[in-house]
Amino acid sequence: MRDRRFPAAAGSTFTVHESAGKRDTRFRQERRKGELQDGPSGRSPDLTRRRFLTRLTQLGFLTLAPLGLPVWRRTAHSAPTPQPLSTAEGTDAAALVREVVGKLGGMGRFVSPGDRVVVKPNLGWDRTPEEAANTHPEVLAELCRLALDAGAGEVRVFDRTCNDARRTYQRSGANDALGAFGSKVRLEHVNDNRFEVTDIPGAEKLTRWPLYRPALEADVLINAPVLKHHGLSGVTIGMKNLMGVMGGNRGRVHQGIDENLVDLNLAVRSHLTVVDATRILTRNGPQGGGTGPVRIANRMAACADVVTADAWGAREFGTTPLDVGHIRRAHERGLGIADLDRVQVL
């Protein structure tokens, strides 16, 4: 079986949390006690023996509960290995996607035939592409096209939007960009009933949270953030983009946001992060408004290490990566590498 993915940390080992059956029983018991307030537990995923062995081999699991949802935890003795970072510059957003993914070996390094793929854009705001609050629709469409060309069995696109989802999907350009794919790509509205309270091994603060089941079940998660300003965290890129798979009261996550974002990224792994810096919202983020705060940069980067991708984005924004709290803590805790001097740039 060929190695199709750059691991988050070559040589690292990962474990998964308790089996789905035990988790569901515990959830029902705690729900009766009134201890949980967010989201019902779903049924355990139906994993075939082939998919089980594929995940075991390709993702480097140390142990795997056969019917559980995977939550990755870096062991204390392991350390991340630098992953290549590809960059590109130009005015054609789709061409930039092809270039940065191609430099990493093509989408086939990440997606195998039959894989369930999630493309997670930043798609939270009722804004036009020119206002730079959301991932550019051409970037989103090209990532879906490449995944399909690599043989993906299904491609799902979603975000838990901050503004009305229907207006956001339409005004952002996502509806039109993905409509041409028909049933091959599902641009879906988040279903509140599909959040599952999930334990996060190795977490320091966010030890348990309701997470979106389709993101947890995906064979491959492509993280596709837009690079932009954020009033609390300074910048929002790949690590913070995964807040779009969180249920519950996300406002609580902003209290101690640096540790919480690292914990979240322990639970939801980005196999590939593609940073859209074609337009950069330089202030009034994350929502923005109008084109005044927008800088046209025409840049893009991709990496299998979300921390490295975020470090590149922070530098493009004009910030020292280790001055951004959640990037620094991710580096210190071994989630990934933020020291770009250690990274091969393609």
Image (tube, rainbow, N blue to C red):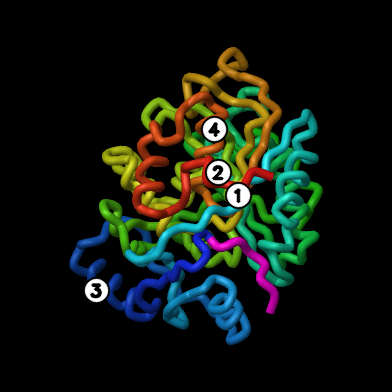
**Residue type marked 3:** Gln
Mark 3 surroundings within 10 Å by alpha-carbon count, few (fewer than 14), some (14 through 19), many (20 or more): few
Label 1 vs label 4, nearer the camera: 1
Q: Which mark is residue 125?
A: 4
How far, Cα to Cα, is label 1 from label 2?
6 Å
Q: Are dots 1 and 2 in contact, CB under 8 Å?
A: yes
Rendered view: 46 above or below 272: below
**In-image side of 125 versus 107 (left or right):** left
For the residues marked 4 and 2, what is the alpha-carbon distance in whole angstroms? 23 Å
Residue wearing tag 3: 29
Q: Which callout, 4 or 2, points at the residue further toward the start of the chain?
A: 4
Amino acid type at mark 4: Trp
Question: Amino acid type of disc 2?
Answer: Ala
Residue extending farthest to the top is 292
Residue at which label 2 appears: 309
- 121 left or right, relative to 256: right
Camera-nearest label, 3 or 1: 1
Q: Magenta span: helix, strand or loop, mainly? A: loop
Residue behind mark 1:
303
The reply to whether residue 120 is visible in this rendering is no
Q: Are marks 1 and 4 in contact (CB under 8 Å)?
A: no
